[in-house]
Image (cartoon, grey):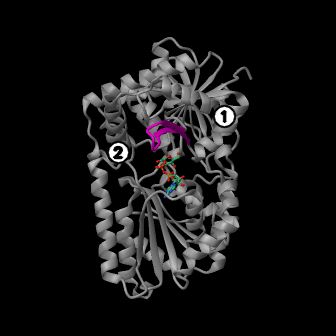
Amino acid sequence: MDLTRLVVVSNRLPAALKKDEQGDWKVVPGAGGLVTAMAPVLRDRGGTWIGWSGTAGGAEVMDLLASFSKEAGYELKPVGLTAEEVNDFYFGFSNEVVWPLFHDFQSRCNFKPRYWHRYVDVNRKFAEAVAKWSGENDYVWIHDYHLMHVGWWLKEMGVTRRTGFYLHIPFPPVDIFLKMPWRTKILQALMEYDLVGFQTYRDRRNFIQCLKLFFPDVKAKGRGPVVRITHDGGTFNAGYFSIGIDYKQFNDMARRPSVKKLAQTIKEADDDRMIILGVDRLDYTKGVPQRLEAVRTAIENYPELHGKIIFTQVLVPSREKVPEYVALKEEIERLVGEINGKFSQPGYTPVQYMYRSLSREELVAYYRAADMALVTPLRDGMNLVAKEYCACNINRKGVLFLSEFAGAAAQLQNGALLVNPYDVEGVAKAIHHAYYMDDKDKRLRMRKMQDIIRKYDIFWWLDSFLQAGFSRGLGDFPPQESVDYAAFFEMGEVEESEDDSSRM
Ligand code: ADQ
């Protein structure tokens, strides 16, 4: 293989720059799954990570990152953004246009032309950084919805690189994507990458349907997860690669004596009660108010559950300065207050609520202690919480309720109890059903999910994408044969010219 180095590009660098108490900058390394998986590859292959440092840049920042790079074993190269750029590109176009539209919330979109223009300009800045910090033989892997235009700019600038793009969030269906004022420009930009990767078959299908609507000459051909798309004499590949977690790391941590002890403390407080857990970033796509309504309905419709279930919601602060998110937090807190006001009794508070980020050990202890997890986003690219919960379920007696609208449903449908998050009575009924589910059934379901999550972990995801990206053909892509992708909502909607007979 002639490609030697990997260049990863994402909106944020995998390390944040923060000021300490003395007002000096310091580098705090990221600990997410993506960083964990990428770091060894970047180190072994040699590589660079390009992203916004959280500041406007400057010599001090460069020095700090240079010393961090030395320790990490790969380079970190910052893109500096001004306050206006952060406002219009990040808070504006990324979070008020693409995020809501791609999650099917078109009524929440704020299609300000200024946002769009700044988005394109900032993407150019990222492309310039790629041109500067990468070489012709490097593979450039661009991540997520903030940076859909980088490949297009590289082409405009005459910079030749092998490029791959991965979308972590859903790609919307045609009827919703049509609302985007800059729809053809976005599709054209995506077609400039050599490989465009999505979370699920459904996302790739939506993308291809949008392409075909706007560019009638588009043809999609191929078998399996990666297809070849031809348009206007050019070709590129589009595939789906469901992102996974570092299963082993979560599972090992859940077995640690310190975590076991913490989990016991969590459980002991409500020894004879079933703990139902919710863990989310504060975001309207996660369906937290609907989930609280479902818990309320469960206690109302099934009085025998009163005093027997505890719902613990962990909410991670996010986008706290945005008024919509402030309002959402208030709504959630009002609902928690109402439910507890109505159903609490001495020694029993039905909803426990935490608004803060937990340490990894605490989070894993909650996963381990929980008898059930309510993962009910209204729409989600994948949802890693669902996978993390299963990885930490040591006794295999846990039950996962999973939204039909989470990308993870395609992989976990055989073990999870799939629910429609808008159907609060349906979710309440599922909770009631799970309360009486026998241990044998629970174990069988959990084992199925764990097998899939262990096999298709974050390292598998990374290898699959890179193999598909590095190979110019479609033939040597690793099979995903034991992933059951025949989710009910995907049936009967197979692309005509897309031979996907290997999709099971
Ligand atoms: P997110 O929308 O952030 O990710 P998700 O996939 O659930 O959603 O990941 C959240 C992460 O935050 C998990 O790894 C979890 O461990 C962590 N986390 C949650 N609560 C925490 C807490 N209280 N303390 C500490 N950590 C906490 C986007 C897309 C998803 C897609 C991922 C990856 O929106 O659909 O699955 O990227 O591609």
Instruction: Please give left or right for residue 392 compared with residue 420 in the image.
Output: right
Residue 449 quadrant: bottom right
Q: Residue at the location (37% across, 87% down)?
A: 345
- Is there a contact, CB below 8 Å, between mark 2 and mark 1? no
Q: Residue at the location (49% across, 72% down)?
A: 276
Which of the pair 444/70 is nearer the observer?
Answer: 70
Q: Residue at the location (39% across, 66% down)?
A: 291
Q: In front: mark 2 or mark 1? A: 1
Residue 131, above or below 49: above
Instruction: Please give left or right for residue 90 compared with residue 231 in the image.
Output: left
Q: x%, y% of residue 98?
A: 37, 39
Residue 181 quadrant: top left
Residue 106, above or below 153: below
Q: Residues within 10 Å of mark 2 (few under 14, many from 20)?
A: some
* Residue 142 in view: yes
Report the quarter where the N terminus lies.
top right
Check residue 18 for magenta coloring: yes
Q: Indicate if the residue with disc 2 has its beta carbon within 8 Å of ligand 1.
A: no
Q: x%, y% of residue 434?
A: 52, 77
Which of the pair 25/433 is nearer the observer?
Answer: 25
Q: Which mark is residue 100?
A: 2
Question: Residue at the top extreme?
Answer: 158
Give the extent of the magenta segment: 15-29
Which of the pair 133/296 is nearer the observer?
Answer: 133
Q: x%, y% of residue 208?
A: 47, 35
Q: Which mark is residue 18?
A: none
> Which element carries disc 1, helix, strand or loop?
helix
> Which element carries disc 2, helix, strand or loop?
helix
Report which residue position mark 1 lands on: 71
Q: CA distance from mark 2 to mark 1?
A: 38 Å
